[in-house]
Structure formats: C-alpha cells, structure tokens
C-alpha cells in the first residue's frame, strides 16, 4: 500500500461486464472491457487507498496491489459489494446487466428438431448503485456512478444522479464514433450537486487520475 492522500481510506470499485447465464454453457453479457474501472482502481491505489476491486469477466487484467474479487452475475456483484462494505467511497464503473434470464435452464438447451425456438424470459437485476446509495448507516461517504449516454448526456445523467441517489455521476458519451467502448480515450462530464463539469477528451488513465484526485479532495 502506497502512502498518499487516500492512505487509510477504503474504496470499493466495481468494473467490467456481468454475465447472466442462459444455461450451463451460454450467457448474456455486454461490450464493457473493464478498462475505465481498472484504471480507476489503479489510480486510487496510487493515492494510497485500500481498494476492493470487484470485477466481472473483463478483457483487461486486474491491477496489482488491490484486492481482486471476481464475480460473474449482477447478483454475485451485489453480494460482493455488500461483503466489502463499509467503505469511505464507492465507484461503480461496472456495466451491470439490467436483466437476468428468469427461465435459466439447468441443462444445456438443445435443438429438438421440432422447429420451435427457445423463448427467454427476463427479470430485473438488483441496481447495485441505487442500493449502495441508500444503504443506510454503512453508506460510503462518497458514492460515484457512471452513465453511458448517447444523447442529451448532461440532462439524462443529471436525472440519473437524482434517481440513483449517488453523489457524483461520471457521464460518458458512448454515441457511435465516440470510440469509448473498448477504446483508449474517454470524454466525460462530472455531475455533482453543484452542476456539470465537462472534461476534455483524455485517456482513460487520465480520467482515472483526475477522478481519484477529486475523490481524495472530497474525502479530505
Ligand atoms: O441505469 P444505468 O445502467 O445507466 O446506470 C449506470 C450506473 O449504475 C453505473 O454506475 C453502473 O455501474 C450502475 N449500475 C449498477 N447496477 C445495475 C445497473 C447499473 O450498479 N443493475
């Protein structure tokens, strides 16, 4: 553990996609690479924080010097966050699946020759960010969420901040051509109670360092 402005602080970071099983060999997931969440965990570590890094199956390797908790489903991620609390701050950068398959099969689904197609039914996953934001006496002092938006980025993310009950929302533009998903750069707007602050386009590592610096100021 390094010495820095976040020494003695515990931060929970969620990152990467979740995988929601259809049957023992198939799942539903999304294109999150885990790059931004991983960079944030590393930047918090570099400022001295103890980091619980809760990650779905991501493309990028988890950082060194943090506690890595690997999960697959949203439900497992929620339980891992609960087990990691209390924390001084929580940064929820994971792309959590909104729905899980309600009629998950316990055996591999097979073509039966009848020409009938399987029908998937869905049920809502827990909203981990909304739940942490309202977690009562154990609530982290600072809860940071992300919002991937394609249009009306500031308006939608401002509404999301209220709805979820978190302190900050890092809104990123994921419209076609933004190159955010799987790309090296990110263009974000930091939304807090005091308004919206647009950051210039920068690498995900730079976004992470700047955000970690702000978190350190907020917890100081
Ligand atoms: O509602 P939406 O998915 O756009 O919200 C994004 C934010 O909420 C992200 O911070 C994400 O990590 C978090 N989230 C969550 N649990 C969910 C859905 C989203 O923690 N089930």
Image (cartoon, helix red, strand yellow):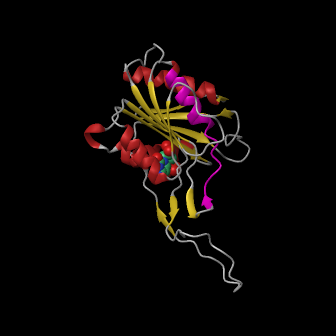
Furthest toward the left, the residue is 137
Report the front residue among 110 and 210: 110
Residue 196 horizontal/vertical position (percent): 50, 34
Query: Is the C terminus in the top left, top right, bottom left or bottom right quadrant?
Result: top left
Q: Residue at x 65, y 37 (%)?
A: 60
Q: Is residue 74 left or right of residue 35?
A: left
Is 102 drawn above or below residue 14 in the view shown? below
Q: Residue at x 63, y 30 (%)?
A: 204
- On the image, which quarter does residue 185 sit in? top right
Residue 85 horizontal/vertical position (percent): 35, 37
- On the image, which quarter does residue 134 sit in? top left
- On the image, which quarter does residue 205 sit in? top right
Residue 65 horizontal/vertical position (percent): 52, 24
Q: Is residue 133 magenta?
A: no
Q: Is residue 162 left or right of residue 56?
A: left
Q: Which residues are magenta?
A: 26-45
């Amino acid at each position: 553990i390094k010495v820095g402005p976040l020494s003695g602080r515990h931060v929970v970071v969620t990152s990467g996609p979740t995988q929601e099983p259809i049957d023992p060999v198939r799942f539903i997931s999304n294109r999150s690479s885990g790059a931004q969440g991983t960079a944030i965990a590393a930047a918090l570590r570099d400022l001295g924080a103890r980091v619980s890094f809760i990650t779905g199956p991501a493309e990028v390797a988890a950082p060194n010097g943090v506690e890595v908790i690997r999960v697959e489903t949203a439900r497992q991620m929620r339980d891992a966050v609960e087990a990691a609390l209390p924390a001084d701050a929580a940064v929820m950068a994971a792309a959590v699946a909104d729905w899980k398959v309600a009629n998950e099969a316990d055996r591999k689904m097979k073509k039966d020759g009848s020409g009938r197609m399987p029908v998937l039914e869905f049920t809502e996953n827990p909203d981990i960010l909304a739940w942490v934001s309202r977690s009562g006496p154990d609530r982290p002092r600072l809860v940071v969420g992300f919002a991937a938006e394609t249009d009306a980025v500031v308006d939608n993310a401002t509404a999301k901040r209220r709805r979820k009950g978190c302190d900050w929302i890092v809104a990123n533009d994921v419209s076609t051509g933004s190159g955010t998903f799987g790309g090296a750069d990110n263009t974000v707007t930091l939304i807090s109670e005091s308004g919206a602050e647009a950051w210039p386009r920068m690498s995900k590592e730079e976004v992470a360092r700047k955000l970690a610096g702000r978190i350190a100021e907020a917890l100081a």
